[in-house]
Image (spheres, rainbow, N blue to C red):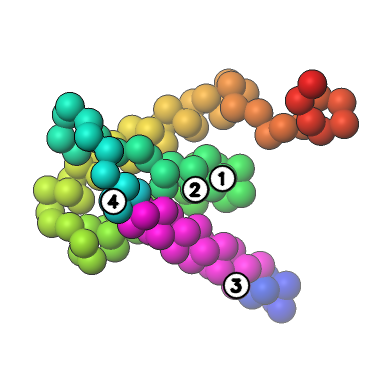
Amino acid sequence: MKKNTSERTERAALYGLLTALAMVLGFVESLIPIPFPVPGIRLGLANLVTVAGLYLVGIRGTAAVTVLRIVLTGLSFGNPYSMAYGLSGSLLSLLVMGAAKKRQVLSSGNQHPGGHCP
């Protein structure tokens, strides 16, 4: 029983850490003035957390972190329209990243001898 509680606590802490990191990267991204021709396009720094989350907690956990990040960021800094655009873009990119991971397009860095690229 103790081990199960400990594992759940560690998982909750990891989810909180991933959500906080994604929110901070999203805020930093909003401070970078990059003129894009289409409004609403961003660099996607928070997607770095999405890629890490896919390997740490799986696609279901990463989807939960993504939705939580979008809702919290939208309530803190945005409006309902920014949340809608953020949810659609983030979930679409999560699906593409999940498919790429499943097809092993993304590597964990362990494919080369010695763990580094030549």
Q: Quadrant of the C terminus?
A: top right
Dot 4: element = helix
Q: Which residue is mark 2?
A: 49
Dot 3: element = helix
Marking on residue 9: 3
Nearest-to-viewer mark from 4 and 1: 4
What range is drawn magenta here? 7-28
Which kind of residue does numbered mark 4 sit on? Ser
Question: Residue 87, can we see it?
Answer: no
The x, y position of residue 111, in whole percent, is 77, 25
Which kind of residue does numbered mark 3 sit on? Thr
The x, y position of residue 64, in whole percent, is 41, 53
Nearest-to-viewer mark from 2 and 4: 4
Marking on residue 30: 4
Dot 1: element = helix
What is the C-alpha distance between the residues marked 3 and 1? 19 Å
The x, y position of residue 17, in whole percent, is 52, 64
What is the C-alpha distance between the residues marked 2 and 4? 16 Å
The x, y position of residue 28, in whole percent, is 37, 54
What is the C-alpha distance between the residues marked 2 and 3? 20 Å
Horizontal side, residue 27 vs residue 5: left or right: left
> Magenta span has 104?
no
Q: Quadrant of the N terminus?
A: bottom right
Nearest-to-viewer mark from 4 and 3: 4
Which kind of residue does numbered mark 1 sit on? Ala
What is the C-alpha distance between the residues marked 4 and 1? 21 Å
Q: Which label's residue is closer to the chain start, 3 or 1?
A: 3
Q: Which residue is mark 1?
A: 52
Q: Which label's residue is closer to the chain start, 2 or 4?
A: 4
What is the C-alpha distance between the residues marked 1 and 2? 5 Å
